[in-house]
Image (cartoon, rainbow, N blue to C red):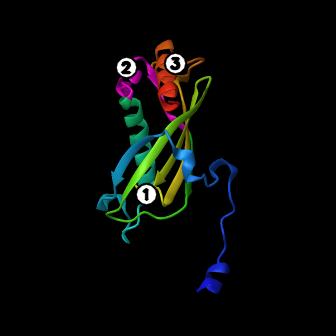
Amino acid sequence: MSEEKSNQPQLSPTSALDTPTLRAFENWYEYIIRVQPHHTDYSGVVWHGSYIAWLEEARIECLRSIGIEFADLVALGCDLPVVDLSLRYHRAIRLGMTAVVRTRMSEVTGVRINWDYAIESPDRQELYVTAKVTLVAVDKERGKIMRQLPTTVQDALARLSGSMNN
């Protein structure tokens, strides 16, 4: 079996999503998920699209945890669509399992907001997925990328950045 495994092609590492050490996930927002039947394919393995939904849910709950309602940002005329998404699958998650989606806002550059993610086992012994997501601020009324984030959004994101660094 080990000879058979060594003959299988291996994925080359990617610099954007290198396997981080589990210690790297300290002080991130944690969002717990349980794999339901509708999250899986016919064999009971989580369908790739489910991971993307969990990333979104974790990001929205992270913002909510510090008092920022996503609906309020949109009401201010600022939409934040995903413009870049990278996932690295490390290990499969199966039906009935529980996992923790860890997220943090890693950087704000102009109107681009970058988020990092890791989906792990609750005991942090298994790393399932790492991901990076970039959002960009769009003027909802005009449908164009904003030149800068509205002050209220900047202030809210500064609160998030401060709470994640504690």
Q: Nearer the viewer, mark 2 or mark 3?
A: 3
- Return the x and y of residue 84 as percentages of the image width and height: 58, 41
Find residue 70 and report its image quarter: top left
| Along the line of sight, the residue nearer the viewer: 67 or 16 | 67
| Residue shown at 53% from the left, 25% from the top | 137
Residue drawn at x 48%, y 40% as measured from the top left? 28
Magenta-drawn segment? 66-83
How packed is label 3: few (under 14 Cα within 10 Å), some, or many (20 or more)? some
Drawn side of residue 71 relative to residue 88, left or right:
left
Picture quadrant of residue 149: top right
The answer to whether residue 23 shows anywhere in this view is: yes
State yes or no: residue 70 in magenta: yes
Camera-nearest residue between 132 and 31: 31
User: Disc 2 marks which residue?
Assistant: 75
Answer yes or no: do the residues labelled 1 and 3 have beta carbons within 8 Å? no
Relative to 74, say whether 60 is above or below.
below
In the image, 56 versus 107, the foreground residue is: 107
Horizontal side of 128 relative to 76 (left or right) equals right
Q: In the rendered structure, which amino acid carries the disc numbered 3?
A: Gln
Name the residue type under label 1: Ser
In the rendering, at what x and y percent does residue 39 appear? Answer: 35, 58
Q: Earlier in the sequence, mark 1 or mark 2?
A: 2
First in sequence: mark 2 vs mark 3:
2
Q: Identify residue for label 3.
A: 154
**Mark 1 and 2 residues: CB-CB less than 8 Å, in contact?**
no
Left or right of 36 in this view: 68: right
Residue at numbered disc 1: 121
Q: Position of residue 22 (x, y in %)?
A: 55, 52
